[in-house]
Amino acid sequence: MGIAALPRKLIFRAMSTGSAIEASNDSSSLSGRRVVVAMSGGVDSSVTAALLVEQGCDVLGITLQLYDQGAARGRAGSCCAGQDIEDAARVAERLGIPHYVLDYESRFRSAVIDDFADSYLRGETPIPCVQCNQTVKFRDLLAMARDLGAAALATGHYAQRLVGPRGPELHRARDLERDQSYFLFATTRDQLEFLRFPLGGMSKAATRALAERFTLPVAAKPDSQDICFVPTGSYARLVEKLRPGALTAGDIVDEQGRTLGRHAGIINFTVGQRRGLGIGTGEPLYVLRLEPDSHRVVVGPRQALAATRVPIGGINWLPDEQPGDGTSLTVTVKLRSAQPPVAAELFLDGAGNGEALLAAPVDGIAPGQACVFYDGTRVLGGGSIRRRQAVAA
């Protein structure tokens, strides 16, 4: 399906009146071929587009309208705020490339926002960025890019796609402080064939320097910090709006089941949380687990947070050698995006489930977060952390 066949109501085109940036002598396997760039309006995706133009690619920028932008418009530090569409259009104009906006609000609502709300009701701590990459970006947008005759879909993620002896592999970014491979574990092998991450080998400082060299209008734009569709920063308020009655009161109890206080709803809590419990016992208490069926929040001392066994479900495996039932691997795992990798023994059942036995205890392992498996810098895959039994590890 060509550009002309796209539904008109879903498209805004930024007419390219600015001059294109000067192309360098650098070339790549994509030089002269069409590449769709997912342009969020931020610095990273803008530099990605500029680099590909410089390399001689036929670049087409697409921005996804994912939610009602009105509440977030102009709010500093938000991702995908209303201003971002205009910023992406200005960058496209500066680069001399066509730019389109696709209305994916309904897809984003059903695939990401609804799942986010339901996860909180289940007592989980969801990662909407993973769900967004898995659905509207690497499923829907990638399919659109193929329909438009593109040879690749490029994004501004800090991760590396390296070609190994059996095809492309997903690796951590060279700058480990900026690494976003944790959020990409659900990428499939077929998607990885088509994806490109031009920023994976550089630092954020280098990206900023390129934005200045390309004189991009977003060169000084701050990085996004918040979940894009939570304009107030209050997850609980959003969940209550989407799921009326979600704020069901319940008991705060200790590990022995003794009632220590009351709470207004489990959606206000996450495993490992210390502040905002509203109880005083003379010692610091942390949320150990959430029990959605009984609406109980179980708290205890910090040492009770430590665990070495991590149950995992919904596993995506990237290498082409699929593990069978009973497979055991020595790997490192990440249990939060900002946490360092931990050595572990990974046990898989061949049906999308498994368990990671950690070499050292880790605090605050939260159901709904991801457990991502690495072999050195290579991402082997990952899955969703499931609820563990209420026993000490």
Image (cartoon, helix red, strand yellow):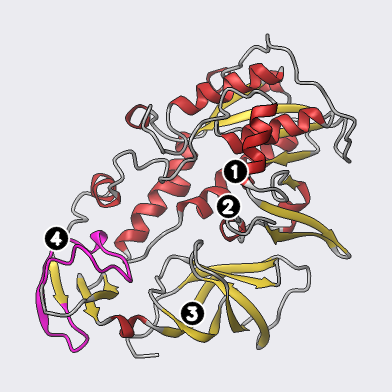
Q: CA distance from mark 1 to mark 4?
A: 35 Å
Q: CA distance from mark 3 to mark 4?
A: 29 Å
Horizontal side of 90 relative to 29 (left or right) equals: left
Residue 297, quarter of the rendered image: bottom left
Residue identified by numbered label 4? 264
Badge 1 amino acid: Lys
Q: CA distance from mark 2 to mark 1?
A: 7 Å
Residue at point 55% right, 68% down?
Answer: 383
Residue identified by numbered label 2? 134
Could one spot residue 7 in this view of the protein? no
Badge 4 amino acid: Ala
* Local secondary structure at mark 2: helix
Residue at point 12% right, 66% down?
Answer: 278
Residue 264 at x, y percent in the picture: 14, 60
Residue 183 at x, y percent in the picture: 56, 56
Q: Nearer the viewer, residue 208 or 59?
A: 208
